[in-house]
Amino acid sequence: MQDVVHEATTSEVAARLAAVTDRIRAAEAAAGRAPGSVALVAVSKGHAAPLARAALDAGHRLFGENRVQEAKAKWPALREAFADCRLRLIGPLQTNKVKEAVALFDAVETVDRPRLAQALAASWALSTGQVARSCGGGSPRLSSRAVAAHAATAPR
């Protein structure tokens, strides 16, 4: 019975993803943007791992989570099964959870204070040598020093 529910969920999710993708492509065309220039971040906040799995099975690979704890419970197994998926933290981050966030996420979208930027920069520099700058969706990677310096001088 569980397999039938999973298949139904996967087909429903696939249909919804296709509908949203079609609307995004139409909006890109209307705005004169290149096809594929807008990325759809599927927010899995508050949804169980099987629903995220259904989106992965349907071919989607870019996800957003709002909480480190929820991502920690849900995503390690999913990322093991789908190594090409990308995960962004889209909610607030406390500095005491930076190391966990760096281990789990490909990008942090919500850097709202210099101290957090510095902690992320230091932690990311230790693990990858780079920090993802996610402003504007898909922006190039910058050095950890550049991100920390920018965040330290940005208005609050």
Image (cartoon, rainbow, N blue to C red):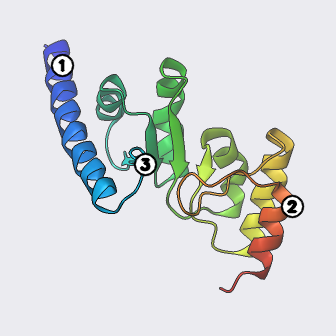
Q: Earlier in the sequence, mark 1 or mark 2?
A: 1
Q: Name the residue: 33% across, 23% down.
A: 57
> Which secondary structure, mark 2?
helix
Residue 75 % position (x, y): 49, 33
- Residue 1 shown left or right of residue 65 in the figure: left
Which of discs 1 and 2 lies nearer the camera? The answer is: 2
Query: Which badge, 2 or 3, is on the more N-terminal residue?
Result: 3
Q: Are marks 1 and 2 in contact (CB under 8 Å)?
A: no
Of circles 1 and 3, the one toward us is 3
Extreme residue toward the front, this view: 32
Image coordinates for residue 10, horizontal then vertical, percent: 22, 26
- Which residue occupies the foreground of this view, 120 or 133? 133
Amino acid of disc 1: Glu
Q: Residue at x 42, y 50 (%)?
A: 34
* Residue at the spot of label 2: 145
At numbered mark 1, what does the secondary structure look like: helix, strand or loop? helix
Amino acid type of the residue tagged 3 in the rendering: Ala
Q: Amino acid at mark 2?
A: Arg
Q: CA distance from mark 1 to mark 3?
A: 26 Å
Name the residue beneath numbered marker 3: 39
